[in-house]
Image (spheres, grey):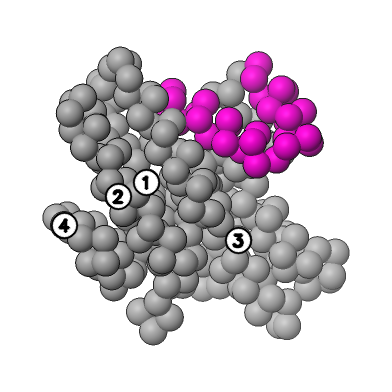
Amino acid sequence: MSHTSQRRGLSPAEPGKELIVLAMIPSEYQNKTGIGSAMAELGVMMLKHHPENWILKNFTTTKIPQLGPAQGFLEWFYQRSPARAERLTIRLVASVSTVITALWTDKEKVINLLNELKSDWVANNQKNGYPISIVLSGLFSDIHHCCQKSHCQEHTYLQSLGIFGVAQNLPGEKELELITMCGHGLVGNNYVRDLIRKVQTQELSPKEASLKLAEPCVCGIVNPIRAEEIFSQLAKK
């Protein structure tokens, strides 16, 4: 998935720090009877395996057009039962979306999710003709490990060749590690620099900055754990 392949800062020397699971359907199948329910079921299964971030986790702080008038109710419901509100939100969004995403920092949780999908969910989709693709994004070594342990067949790879052109005008490497956590460009350079400044002046803790960093990314693929580590490193400079 191209919007996750530009991420920087991961290294085979430190495996298991980040894995993203994406589920997608071709847009022409979006209105096929029952496919929304299958996506909603997948969304709930994703939450069951405790990701660090997921699509529209930020629904309490960011206006989400897909939720429409339901957002106000969900924000109210979240104050009373956060876990139930999160499950309801991902069900609503997944049932009308062609893509859902979640991010983990624990390979075993991803393996458990893949094993659960293989038990009945995949077979039911094949039976009903639902072309839902499951994509793993991360280090090749981590993806290979997860597929091997869950007996899934890897069949396609996408790898970024990096950045070409006037690269000397790019932000610093640590800044890029934060900026590229959002593949749609919603985490901007000036926003990142402002968060770094606030961490260095102790206006925000590294953890608070990492949560702020994740807010604009509605896909839910910013890694708050890795971001907190980076902010902690930058606070010492």
Sequence-wise, the earlier of marks 4 and 2 is: 2
Instruction: Judge from the rendering whether residue 133 lies leftward or rightward of residue 77; answer left or right.
Output: left
In this rendered view, identify the residue nearer to me: 5 or 161.
5
Q: Provide residue 108's location: percent of width, then percent of height.
A: 41, 66
> For numbered disc 4, what is the local secondary structure?
loop
| Residue 201 shown left or right of residue 32 in the figure | right
Disc 4 target residue: 153
The numbered mark, 2 or 1, whose residue comes first in the sequence reads: 1
| Amino acid at dot 2 | Val
Position of 71 relative to 58 (above/below): above
**Mark 3 packing: few (<14 Cα in 10 Å), some, or many (20+)?**
many
Residue at image mark 2 = 135
Q: Which residue is mark 3?
A: 224
Mark 3 or mark 1, earlier in chain:
1
Predominant SS along the magenta part: helix
Amino acid carrying mark 3 in the image:
Pro
Give the amino acid at mark 4. Gln
Q: CA distance from mark 3 to mark 1?
A: 18 Å
Q: Residue at 81% of width from left, 63% of height from top?
A: 204
> Are discs 3 and 1 less than 8 Å apart at CB?
no
> Marks 2 and 1: CB-CB under 8 Å?
yes
Q: Identify the magenta region.
A: 69-98
- Give neighbour class at mark 1: few <14, some 14-19, many 20+ (Cα, 10 Å): many
**Image position of 29 with respect to 222: above or below:** above
Q: Which mark is residue 22?
A: 1
